[in-house]
Structures are given as structure tokens and as C-alpha cells.
Image: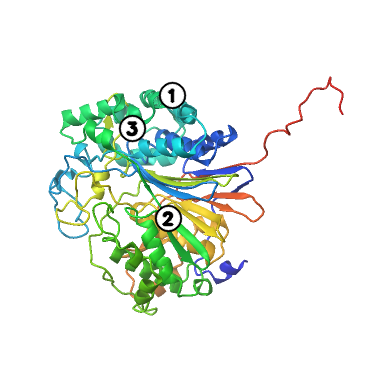
Amino acid sequence: MSGWQARAGSPFAREKQPALASKGMVVTNHPVASAAGAEMLLSGGNAIDAAIAALFTLTVVEPMMVGTLGGGVAHIRLADGRHVVLDGLSTAPAAARPDMYRPVSDTLPDYQETEGLENKVGVLAMGVPGALAGWCQALAAHGTLPLEEVLRPAIRAAAEGFRVTAYLTGAIADAAADLARDPGLAATFLPDGAPPAPGTLLRQPVLAESLRLIAQEGPAALYGGELGRALAAHMAASGGLITLADLEAYRVAERAPIVGHYRGYEVLAPPPPSSAGVHVTQMLNLLEGYDLAALGSGSAATIHLLAEALKMGFADRGAATADPAFVKVPVELLTSKDYAASRRALLREDAAQDWTPGIPPGEILAESANTTHVTVADSAGNIVASTQTINSLFGARFSIPGTGLIANNYMYNFDPHPGRALSVAPGKRVFTSMAPTIVRKDGKPAFALGLPGGLRIFGSAMQAVINLIDHGMELQDAVEAPRIWTQGHVLELEPTVSAEVEAKLTALGHRVQRVKHIGGGMGAVRFRADGMIEGAACWRADGTPVGLSGGLARPDVRFNPDVAQR
């Protein structure tokens, strides 16, 4: 039994095994998408080529999670050591207004809900999509293969079909009532009026044609071209707000990651409007004052500290996750060691507390947990950690007629109440909890990870960082370890947290709730001292690591038995 296992308060058993390779690693939440990324590496492409191929393929095989009409964040570490964050998050259309929705409540848990679900389902729920622009910009700036080649696996999966997993069948069943109201979605995902059974070959020929158009025309197909005109026409006919001008005006934002420092490691994650860089750094700064390794993974003492750190982070989050073009974000304050020390001085190790912000408060809103993530690395040193989504399960629950493309419902991430930091405003970017994280040690990449899961993303990423750094876990154990989550109401615990630990947490004053899982499937890669790349995916999704080793023949070697050997 290893050191961390001997001290663990909540032992658990692995459900999956990692992959090990020398040439490259692709980890996604679907085996077909991981294969698509590996295909690019095998073709001589780099990690950026592989990640974009995987994401396009995920739009086919994980259609409930991600699409070209969605948005997301890509954290790229280039072979020369530079880091860049490409923000392809959705924006509010120019015609959007702070009072465009009618909220049903001014308090949680219904604070974000609106009459008629207009910010969640239907045309008024859709934000201007940024995913396609972000993916194409990443490929053009940092990839090596043409878009047409990178799209081949996705087109093949859409045209020729793929085998439905139980995960997809369940997602379709959960959204069936809304899917049935959209002719395109019903025809694809509810054949004969019911979700396809696991193992069914699912073809999407209309989507394949849209992907072929993108392969030929690039992002212009959407941002001004045929697909964009179809989207704008559907909006105009259905009372939506997005116009062709909104699409043509969209721009990807290039940002620098926030760099946190934790026990000799550098933790790099996206800045606002993402929560990750600010609040993962904030929480790690606070927790650095405790010997988590000695307290033990999954122990009551460790979970209590994690929970208090999460509550502090969420208390401050409302003022630190809005679009920085609209709201001044106190990044330096929140990520400073001094601020963490001042908050740590208020923490009690013997009792749970309710926390108010250490900065002027905003509003804490909900986010969709239906997202996807890819983590890719190549042997040259390129790394991509990218989290992408159409927000809720099947987004706004409608498709653009004649395209096979599913609309996002990113407008749900805004505050439906006017006059708030996170209220709707024309052109404003949505805020997000996405946490594509790359960690360095002595200037070199140590590991990279990310996951879907809405509000629970950045807290789960933080826990994985602690699993690897404080507890010294193997990569597979770090992504599968039991997670906890709270934003100050109840403390959620996954099933493998022990009953004894739950009792101790209750005694400390935590309101405990058991849940099936917290967040989604994590994908991670780790860079070993021997030059090998390790990949791992957890049990919370169809995650599959695919690694490449071997390689081409020596330049002077070929098989020709008729030529004398020299």
C-alpha cells in the first residue's frame, strides 16, 4: 500500500487503466473522438491538429454536449514553451437587452429561471456561437494539417455512422420530450419515436454535408456563408435575435493564462470570463497553509478544508467571472498570497462556516454540466487542454433546419435580472467554470487536465491537482478519486467517500448530500521523467486515452530482398 493509500480516509478502487506512449496521447470522452485525434498524430500532425479533429468528431458522437454552434476555451502550450488561451465563448447578440427575460424569482434556487424557460429552451436562449471560430483559429495559427484533412474523421462518423453508447442513449432519453418537438432532432435521435438502443449504428447525413461545407469554406461557412444564412433565417422566422451581422462580427479572444504557484509547481489556467485561473489559484493559495498530505486523501479533515475553500471561492466568484470587457475583475487581489492568508485566518478547522465575499458581492449563477473536454499532447511538447459545450444537454433543444447543427443555450449563463454584473448586454461574453489546466514544474510541463461539469468544473480540477501534488497519486487514481463539491448550501459527496467520514463532516456542521457523481469525465496527461506520456480518463464518462508509440522506419531502411545487404 502506497503512502497516500495508507493515509486515505475513503479508499477506492480504479475502474479504468491508463495508457502509456512515447509519441503522443489523446484523451477524450468518446473512443471514436480519441481515435480521430490519434489519426491526426499518425498522419504526422501535432497536438493541435489532433485536438481539433477530436472536437469536430465529438460534435458527431457526443452531440448532446458539444457542437460547432457552441463555445469553449482552449488552453494551448506550444512546443517553444509559450502558453495561449483561445476564448471562443458565445456572446449575446446585438439585439439582446438586460430586461429581455422575465425572472420568476430573486432568490436561489430559482434565481436564474425565467417565464416560459426563454433563457433555456428555444431561439431566445441561443448566444452567438464561437466554437467553430475558435477551433479554426487554433488550427490555422498552431496546427500543421489542412482543415479538410482534420475534418475527415468527423465527416466519416457522420456519414457512415458510429455505434451508440449507453451514455448517449440515456442522454437522449433525458431530453426526449424537447427533442420530439424539433423535426430535425426527432428524426435523428428519436427514430420510431424512441432513443436508439446502445450498439445501434447512428448516421447523420445532413450534419455530414454541413461538415463538408466547413471543410471547403472554413469558418466563413458559418460567419457569413450558407450555414450562417440558414441560422439567421431561422432566427428571423422564429422570433430569435441572432443576425448575419452578429455572426460576421464575432471574434475569438486571445488571452494569457493566470499562473498560480503551489508547493513548487506553477498552475496555469484560463483568466476571466473563466473562473478557473482566478479561483483555482485562490483556493490553492488558501490550502497551501495546511499539510493535506499528512491529513490524508478523502479524510474528514481534508474534505472539510476543501469544502471551506470552495465556499470561500464561490463567495468571491460572482464579482470575478464576468466578461472583463464589461466588468473590472480584481484578479491580482484574489490570486495574491496575502489575500489567501487573510481568508485563512478566518477558517476554523473544527467547524463548518457560511462565508460572505471578501470583495463586493455579485450573483452566483448556475451553469450546465453538459460539456466535453479533450487533453492532447505530442512528443514535440505541444499540449492542448480544451473544454467545449453547447451548454445544456442538447443545448437549446432545437436544430437549424437543413444543417444538422444543434443550437447552444448559452444565454442561460447570464443573469436574467437587469442591473447586475452578470446581466445580459449586447456583445457580452458568457462567464464559465471551464478549467483546462496545465501544470509546470521547473519550467517544464508536469501534467494537463480538464473536465466537463458546469459549476463543479474548477473545484474538481483543483482537487485533481491536489491529488497529484499533495497526495502523490498515480494519474489514474487522481482522476478517479472521490470528489466533493459545495458552493455554500449543501456539501455533495460521491459514493466512495466513507460513511465514517460523512458522519464526521456532519458533526462539523456540514449539510451532507450523497450524489452519483460530481462533474463529468476528466481527461488528463502526465509527462514522466523517462520521456513517456501517460493518459487517463475517469469512470464518469466514455473517456478513452489513446497513445502512440513506435514510428517510421529509419531513413535508409527498406525491404528489398533482391538488393545485396551492405
Image coordinates of residue 19 in percent, x first then y, are 60, 47
Q: Which residue is mark 3?
A: 194
Q: Which residue is mark 1?
A: 159
86 versus 366 height, above or below:
above
Residue name at image x 57 percent, y 47 percent: 381
Q: Amino acid at mark 3?
A: Ala
Residue name at image x 35 percent, y 72 percent: 339
Q: Is residue 547 left or right of residue 413?
A: right
Q: Few, some or many C-alpha atoms within 10 Å of disc 3 (few <14, some 14-19, many ≥20)?
A: some
| Mark 3 or 1, closer to the camera | 1
Using the rendered view, name the quadrant where residue 109 is placed: bottom left
Could you give the CA–CA distance between mark 2 and mark 3, rounded to whole angstroms? 41 Å
Residue name at image x 41 percent, y 68 percent: 306
Are the residues at dot 3 and dot 1 in contact (C-beta closer than 8 Å)?
A: no
Q: Which residue is mark 2?
A: 269
22 versus 309 height, above or below:
above
Q: Few, some or many C-alpha atoms within 10 Å of disc 1 (few <14, some 14-19, many ≥20)?
A: some
Viewer-closest of 438 and 346:
438
N-terminal of the two: label 2 or label 1?
1
Residue extending farthest to the top is 562
Asked if one can make out residue 287 in the rendered structure from this viewpoint, the answer is yes
Q: The N terminus is located in which quarter?
A: bottom right
Using the rendered view, name the quadrant where residue 501 is placed: bottom left
Q: Few, some or many C-alpha atoms within 10 Å of disc 2 (few <14, some 14-19, many ≥20)?
A: many
